[in-house]
């Protein structure tokens, strides 16, 4: 899944692509496999996850975590930027739903795993 997603994201036509769900439209600004720089020891950890950043500041991140006894755990992080202050108090599941829809469509996560819901939502 991650290799297929990376191939899709690193295609030159991916940047600038628009995704719409309902009234929300998101335009891809950047897609990468991000790295983490440790401010204490200066080390750099590369290939930490696939990240899609949209022009409004929203983002989708896919990370693998090999903490289980078999296979890997797929972690999906969704951040949505909202400039309308009163909307930040709305239900996060509703606010994030358009980005979740985009993430699931791009990754085909449900088809690949057979899961229809996450095991943990934070």
Image: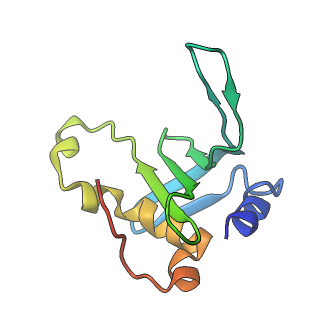
Is residue 38 shown above or below 84?
above
Q: Of 48 and 98, which appears nearest the observer?
A: 48
Q: How is the image coloured?
A: rainbow
Q: Residue at x 41, y 63 (%)?
A: 98
Q: Between 37 and 31, which is closer to the camera in this rendering?
A: 37
Q: Position of residue 27 (x, y in %)?
A: 59, 51
Q: Name the residue rendered at 68%, 22% in the picture.
A: 43
Residue sitting nearer the eye, 18 or 115: 115
Specify the farthest residue to the right. Answer: 12
Image coordinates of residue 48 in percent, x first then y, are 63, 44
Q: In this image, 121 relative to 64: left or right?
A: left
How many discs appear? 0
Quarter of the image containing the N terminus?
Answer: bottom right
From this viewpoint, which residue is outermost toward the front?
Answer: 69
- What's the residue at 83%, 53% (across, down)? 12
Q: Residue at x 52, y 54 (%)?
A: 26
**Residue closer to the observer: 51 or 73:** 73
**x then y, percent, for residue 119:** 34, 69
Question: Residue 62: where, in percent of width, then height?
Answer: 56, 56
């Amino acid at each position: 899944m991650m290799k297929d997603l990376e191939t899709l994201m690193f295609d030159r036509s991916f940047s600038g692509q628009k995704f719409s769900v309902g009234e929300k439209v998101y335009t891809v600004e950047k897609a990468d496999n991000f790295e983490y720089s440790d401010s204490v020891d200066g080390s750099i950890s590369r290939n930490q996850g696939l990240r899609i950043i949209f022009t409004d500041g929203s983002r989708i991140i896919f990370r693998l975590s090999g903490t289980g006894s078999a296979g890997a755990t797929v972690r999906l992080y969704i951040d949505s930027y909202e400039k309308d202050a009163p909307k930040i108090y709305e239900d996060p599941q509703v606010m994030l739903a358009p980005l979740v829809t985009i993430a699931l469509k791009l990754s085909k996560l449900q088809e690949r795993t057979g899961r229809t819901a996450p095991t943990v939502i934070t």
